Amino acid sequence: MIPEPYGGKLVENIMNENEKQRVLSDKLPLITTVMEQVYDAEKIAIGAFSPINGFMGSEDYDQVLDKTQLSNGLPWSIPIILTPTDRSINALKAGDEFLLNGLDGEPFVLVKIEEKYNIDKGRFAEMTYGTKDMAHPNVFDLQKWGEVAISGKVKLIKRLSVPAAQYEFTPKETRNIFENRGWKNVAAYQARNPPHMAHEFIQRMTLERDDIDGLFIQPVIGKLKKGDYKPEIIMKAYEIFIKNYYREDRVLLGSLSIAMRYAGPKAVLLYAIMRRNYGCSHYIVGRDQAGVGSYYDPYDGQRVFDRYDIGVKPVKYDEVFYCTKCGMMVSSKVCPHGPEYHIDTSQTKIRKLLVEGKQLPLEILRPEVAKILESGDVINQ
Ligand SMILES: [Zn+2]
């Protein structure tokens, strides 16, 4: 069964033409905020964060931080809040409306203010990322956020312009696609890198399961961190990979433009909730998903599903590598051979070989994907 949206109802706060005209002719203030919150605003409106239909108020915010739940008791791991960086927000009060500036300087959502409250960024960092260390990319980014949070319902005027916009489905759209294809049990594959052999192995193992009808590969292509591949590259690599190696009727490629949260298990929980809204019954969790540095236990992302029931079944995988003795991709669950027989397929290794202009063996990367990555187009700041 395609699962119900999280909390029972899919949020769809999208304006019709009349509303758009009224709102745009009202001369409402245009407010700017950080990129990660711009992405979140759009995802709230299209229902990716259902049942949340606006930026969180202080009650939800506190409960998410302290108890990993919304004020209605539903498990929720990371606050979705708006803290504008624009000083003109100070003049606005509860009941006022404003437009939020999209990445192109144009308004894309309307926000109606319900509450203004102060946030303590140290507490946010500690409770969400488990650290206040500025070396953590998301903790670092918090410095740029405003100090005052604004809660309120969000309504979409237009979609954001992002790279590979044709892949930015709404949850309603993917649900329709799954239904039209007759998929009832869909596994979501979260990615933030172009596909290499270890990813492929995990995807194939999932497609082989008789309780899975289809695979929804949905890379996060919003704000990534320095050294990550650019969104266009990730999507192009997946496009050509799927075309060459998978059955078209078993796989759907989409993209998710949100800021990557490197919050280990808390990020896994949030991403799995979002994928339930997109219509997925299962969620694939490998080793150290949404991790960075050594802040999180690499397998806690799998155990988090035992602590919180979000109505999504985890599909868990151990670390995967190529074993020269077994002669195939394996995991430590199966392979008896020592590390001297194992080929590291990490992104770091791939990048190193590409930079050195070396040929990547098939045990690591498909040649079609290697060709795209050779351009070396990565985020530099
Ligand atoms: Zn082996």
Image (cartoon, grey):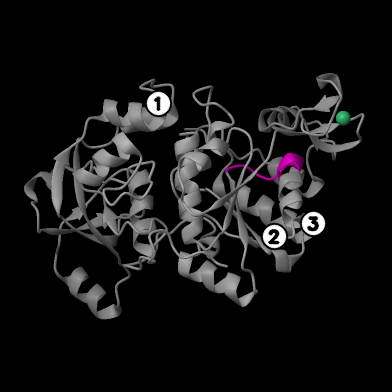
Q: Return the residue nearer the eye: 255 or 324.
A: 324
Q: Which residue is mark 1?
A: 130
Q: x and y percent of residue 308 in the render?
A: 45, 43
Residue 44 vs residue 313, the one in the foreground: 313
Residues rendered magenta in the picture: 192-199
How many C-alpha atoms fall within 10 Å of the one at disc 3: few (<14), some, or many (≥20)?
few
Q: Is residue 81 above or below residue 342?
A: below
* Marker count (numbered): 3
What's the amino acid at mark 2?
A: Asp
SS of the residue at dot 3? helix
Q: Amino acid at mark 3?
A: Tyr
In front here: 40 or 65? 65
185 over 345 or under it: above or below: below
The answer as to whether callout 2 falls within 8 Å of ligand 1 is no
| Mark 3 or 1: the one toward you | 1
Q: Where does residue 311 sit, x and y in percent of width and height?
A: 49, 54
What number is the disc on residue 245?
3
SS of the residue at dot 1? Answer: loop
Q: Residue at coordinates 73% horizontally, 66% vertically from top-left?
A: 248
Helix, strand or loop status at disc 2: loop
Identify which amino acid the numbered label 1 is placed on.
Answer: Gly
Viewer-nearest residue: 122 or 352: 122
Q: Which residue is mark 2?
A: 211
Mark 3 beta carbon near ligand 1 (under 8 Å): no
Q: Residues within 10 Å of mark 1 (few under 14, many from 20)?
A: some
The residue drawn where x is 61% and y is 40% is 377
Left or right: residue 263 compared with residue 89: right
- Is residue 270 a member of the stretch shown in magenta? no
